[in-house]
Image: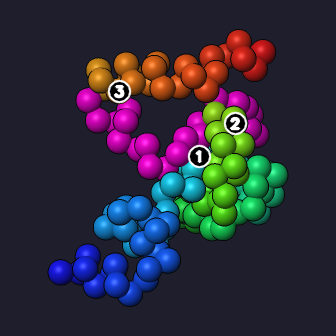
Amino acid sequence: GDKGKGKDKGKGKGDKGKGKGEKGGKSSDEMTVFVRGLPFSCTEEALRKDFSECGEIDRLNFPYNDEGSPKGFAFVQYQEMSGCEAALKFDETEYGGRTINVRMAGDKPDGDRGKGEGKDDKGKGKGKKGKGKGYYD
C-alpha cells in the first residue's frame, strides 16, 4: 500500500514522476542522462563543468569503485529537458581521448536485454536524431 500513500503526500512529486515513482522515489529519469565510456582521468568537477554547458544541473551522480577510482560512467540530472537534449548531442563523441555514450537514463533496458530486438530499435530510434557519424564529421 505504499503507492497510495506516496500519491497523497507528495502531490508535486506525483506530477513530475508520471507514475515512475515506484522505480526510484525522487529521482526523475525523465530529466536524467546516463553517460558512459568516461576516461578514468575525468573528475566529477570536470564533468559537472562540461555538462553544465548543456543546461542547469540538478544532481550529478558520479560513482567510484572501492579503490576510489571513477567507474567510468555518471548520471546527470538536469532541471529542464533542454539540458538533456543538448547533452545527448555528445553521444559517440570524443571526450578526454575516449568515445563516450550519452543516453536518457530511462532507456537502459533497450540494448542490454534481448540484443536482437535492441539493435532494430536502435537503428530506428536513433536515426531520427542524426546519430550517424557523417553528422559530426
Q: Are the two marked residues, 1 and 3, in contact with CB atoms closer than 8 angstroms?
A: no
SS category of the residue bearing label 2: loop
Q: How many numbered marks are there? A: 3
**In this image, 106 relative to 117: left or right?**
right
Identified by mark 2, the residue type is: Phe
Instruction: Identify the residue shown where x is 49% and y is 50%.
Output: 105
Across and down, in percent, residue 113 comes to: 29, 35
Residue 31 visible in the snapshot: yes
User: Which dot marks residue 90?
Assistant: 2
User: What is the distance, in whole Å, between disc 2 and disc 1 at their CAs?
Assistant: 9 Å
User: How would you rate the neighbour count of disc 2 (Cα within 10 Å): few for under 14, some for 14-19, many for 20 or more?
Assistant: some
Q: Position of residue 76 (x, y in %)?
A: 62, 57
Decide which of tag 1 and tag 3 comes sooner along the chain.
1
Q: Is residue 3 left or right of residue 94?
A: left
Q: Please tell me whether residue 98 belongs to the stretch shown in magenta.
A: yes
Quadrant including the N terminus:
bottom left
Label drawn at residue 118: 3
- The part of the image, by quadrant, that contains residue 98 is top right
| Residue 126 drawn in magenta | no
Amino acid type, callout 3: Gly
**Which quadrant is home to the C terminus?**
top right
Query: Which residues, given as a range, are shown in magenta?
Result: 92-114
Q: Identify residue for label 1.
A: 35
Say which label, 2 or 3, has the lower sequence index.
Answer: 2
Relative vertical location of residue 111 with respect to residue 43 in this rendering, above or below: above
Q: Amino acid at mark 1?
A: Val
